Image (cartoon, coloured by chain):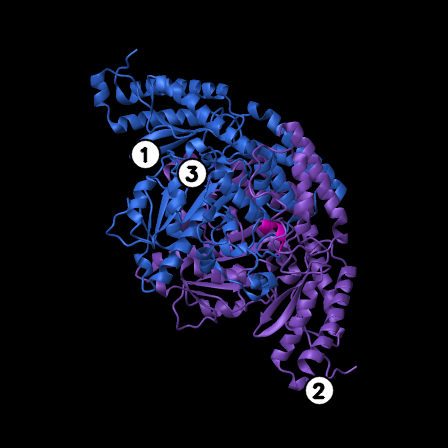
Chain colours: A blue, B purple
């Protein structure tokens, strides 16, 4: 493909992306394809001769598009938001067109390192993080990682290295990662990857430990760990590294009204490291997991490996950041560009408006649930996330006799019906044995109408589920 | 930004990328900016109000572009190739515009998982890998990782898990990663991250061990570990996991004439896992590190964590691949799309032509070095990589009296001069104490003329370095 063929194919790609966003609302949220749909439609081996790009682009529309689930659809309420913005798409486009494999050294492409250092300070500012976490402090600093799992892994490696340097006789088996049962699986995965012990309990003073992952806004329910209590417990253990994972909820710190309930002061006072994913609720296309540490040396002490072929005069002189020593891999994409585009395109006020809009939309839904006879919250709605379940309205005696398992059975029926639909997408979770359903708002195109529609669908399927459950499972008579 | 504003900004981005590639040859290869150039040109905090995208796009041209090193420039011979193609850019563009955070579950976006499974089979086919590594085998399989470091980390975690499951009484401290001194730093980094022991020596039978990283085409010199010998040694140790890292050279397996020297038969016969980075020499924009394993269960046994909110009916039924259990993080980008676009756009024959062209260009350079009086190869040129140094032509007595350190001093002078230039980019390395310079060909726009120009520059700077060295360092008279 020569430059002019690229121009033509590029314009067409832009046009097709425009078409996509114009028609998004009319699409099903959920892809209707069945497992294995693509095999049989694509040859088993690559073509011997190159093909015309028009054929390839058309095959994308014909074969791939039908197998996509539309995360930007206004009725997508599953998992968590992954807000995609035009500014983010353009940032990725410029970055990928340079293919400068940037940033493993400063010299690889100075702009990539320098922009990341500055924009991470912008992002810290947006979220209200203390200056101690900024690159301009010269001590702390921020770096873009791929996912919150990577951020957690890097953090655990640094914490382990720090603890072992201070307590060189410690055995690996005595190091423990503390999480709660509601910590994202990234905690368990870090333990699995690193071969460390994991305790899903509250911190107790009897144990020795090297790391505590606390969560501000859990994936499952949006719960916020009690940071003031943790602060009390950990203050006698200076070697304990507290990592705050706020992958989803962190973006809400952009709005001052959320900062107290998300314990910003505590984060600023005692967190060793803090992670928020701008690729979740922060308007930046995947991937952009922002990680800040209070002392960058903890990362580089743990991760610096500089073979001769990566040495440069600036790196040797220590005058520049070599970001490769701040993360697990070596090569890295130029991800700060899209973060810069988004923060400039929206401005602080635009970013705040988006967050407030999502929270308001969840509020619309929450009000409807509160009034409902057959839906109840399992936990208090948190920011833009509601966790609820179906509870039939029965005579009080029968209501009391309902077992947890019977209610779970009802809710599995309900969720089965919801997930058989393609016009809305929600996800399930389990909370201390209670089967429940999550609704997470994040698409910027979601309006009040979509919330009312969502509620109607949910109420309809809840009623239908109760009917089936009543007839086949429970045999309990409904009131009304 | 609304859809029409995006269309305008998108067309402009495409046009500017076209301009970039039209003007690439006239640019300096190396960015001339100094450390800290960007601070002061960008405000310290994000704007309060959103800005017009035209201002942002123009700032990209004005502030960022001057700080980029041009990896696609025909005179970029540093590090390793990171071939960027228009097909790859378009693949990334379509993928990022969907922002479907694909693939952590099949259900997240079925097309993403299904295309990856198919295209990884295509790539295995292209490189001549055995059917045992293909997803269609149902046992082995391929997955796209971010970097070769990630691929190595995943592999080590799986190897450790496998070994411990078979030898449950093993202590973590007794597990060893074997590499050679020329293995990429990814081996050392994996050991550092995982807290495992690393031995940079040849395998000896006295040791117990869990993993051997062998390299086909080292970064430093393009050396190929002696796989037939390793195969002999390891056959008595079925628990030893042999990972073949061929991050750079793996793409050359696409050409049948390279397969014997890269030991393809051995790879197919006994490697547990194999990694090649299509984002290096494989025409795909960063990132696209392809990892194949002989038994996918080794990955999922080590890495499967499925919290309730990620459970789906298809995943529970085991009818689909959930790629999140094949790598370290959770979220993942839709990277198979660009690999698909590239393999279709080039076809097998186009891919082979590109590889052969790079090798031929290195051959042009190598012929010139062979004829030179003052340059010599430190190792035999390997594929598209030459590793050489300056050696002055002296009377034989004086030549013999030259110390290694004195020659190293000369070559540091030489490399200092080369790296002060902005019209060519090479990198240094060190080989058993010998300071040497690497020239790696990979840009698709590199022609014979660029190789002759590169040689002229190198010869000129070598002569100038010899002169300075002769006067100030060595005091040895030059002949002629």
Query: Where is residue A65 drawn, in percent x and y?
Result: 58, 33
Report if residue B323 lies within the magenta region.
no
Q: Viewed as shown, does residue A87 lie left or right of A438?
A: right
- Of all chains, the one bearing label 1 is A
Q: Which stretch appears magenta?
A: A108-114
Q: Chain of mark 2?
A: B
Q: Do callouts 1 and 2 point to residues on the same chain?
A: no
Residue denoted by label 1: A431
Q: Quadrant of the C terminus of chain B?
A: bottom right
- CA gap between label 3 and label 2 equals 72 Å
| Residue A144 screen position, x and y as percent | 52, 47
Q: Is residue B88 visible?
A: no
Write down the residue under mark 2: B396
Tell me: A445 left or right of A436. right
Is residue B423 left or right of A472 when viewed as pictured?
A: right
As helix, strand or loop, the secondary structure at mark 2 comes to: helix
Q: Residues within 10 Å of mark 2 (few under 14, many from 20)?
A: few
**Which mark, by number, is residue A76?**
none
Q: Secondary structure at mark 3?
A: helix
Quadrant in the rendering for residue B195? bottom left
**Badge nearest the viewer, 3 or 2:** 2
Mark 1 nearby-residue class (10 Å; few <14, some 14–19, many ≥20): some
Residue A110 colored in magenta in the image: yes
Which is nearer the eye, B289 or A438?
Answer: A438
């Amino acid at each position: 493909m020569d430059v002019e063929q690229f121009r033509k194919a590029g314009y067409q790609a832009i046009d097709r992306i425009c078409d996509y966003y114009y028609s998004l609302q009319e699409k099903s949220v959920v892809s209707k394809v069945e497992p294995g749909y693509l095999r049989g439609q694509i040859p088993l081996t690559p073509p011997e001769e190159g093909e015309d790009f028009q054929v390839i682009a058309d095959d994308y529309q014909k074969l791939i598009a039908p197998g996509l689930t539309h995360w930007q659809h206004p009725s997508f309420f599953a998992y968590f938001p992954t807000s995609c913005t035009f500014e983010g798409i353009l940032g990725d486009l410029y970055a990928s067109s340079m293919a400068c494999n940037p940033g493993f050294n400063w010299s690889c492409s100075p702009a990539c390192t320098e922009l990341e250092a500055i924009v991470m300070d912008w992002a810290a500012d947006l979220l209200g993080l203390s200056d101690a976490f900024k690159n301009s402090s010269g001590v702390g600093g921020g770096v873009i990682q791929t996912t919150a799992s990577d951020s957690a892994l890097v953090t655990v490696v640094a914490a382990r290295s720090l603890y072992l340097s201070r307590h060189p006789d410690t055995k690996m088996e005595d190091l423990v990662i503390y999480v709660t049962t509601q910590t994202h699986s990234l905690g368990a995965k870090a333990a699995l990857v690193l071969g460390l012990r994991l305790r899903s309990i509250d911190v107790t003073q009897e144990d020795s430990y090297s790391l505590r992952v606390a969560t501000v806004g859990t994936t499952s329910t949006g719960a916020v760990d009690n940071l003031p209590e943790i602060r009390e417990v950990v203050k006698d253990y200076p070697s304990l590294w507290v990592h705050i994972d706020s992958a989803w909820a962190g973006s809400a710190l952009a709005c001052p009204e959320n900062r107290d309930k998300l314990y910003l002061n505590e984060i600023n006072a005692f967190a060793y490291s803090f992670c928020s994913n701008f690729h979740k609720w922060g308007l930046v296309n995947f991937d952009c997991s922002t990680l800040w540490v209070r002392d960058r040396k903890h990362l580089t002490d743990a991760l610096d490996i500089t073979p001769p072929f990566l040495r440069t005069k600036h790196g040797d002189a220590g005058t520049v950041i070599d970001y490769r020593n701040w993360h697990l891999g070596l090569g890295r994409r130029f991800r700060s560009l899209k973060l810069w585009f988004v923060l400039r395109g929206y401005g602080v006020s635009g970013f705040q408006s988006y967050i407030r809009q999502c929270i308001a939309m969840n509020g619309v839904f929450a009000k409807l649930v509160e009034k409902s006879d057959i839906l109840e919250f399992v936990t208090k709605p948190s920011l833009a996330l509601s966790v609820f379940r179906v509870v039939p309205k029965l005579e009080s005696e029968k209501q009391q006799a309902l077992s947890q398992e019977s209610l779970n059975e009802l809710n599995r029926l309900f969720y089965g019906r919801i997930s058989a639909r393609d016009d809305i997408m929600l996800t399930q979770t389990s909370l201390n044995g209670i089967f429940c359903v999550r609704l997470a708002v994040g698409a910027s195109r979601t309006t009040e109408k979509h919330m009312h529609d969502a509620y109607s669908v949910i109420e309809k399927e809840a009623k239908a589920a109760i009917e089936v459950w009543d007839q086949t499972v429970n045999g309990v008579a409904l009131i009304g």
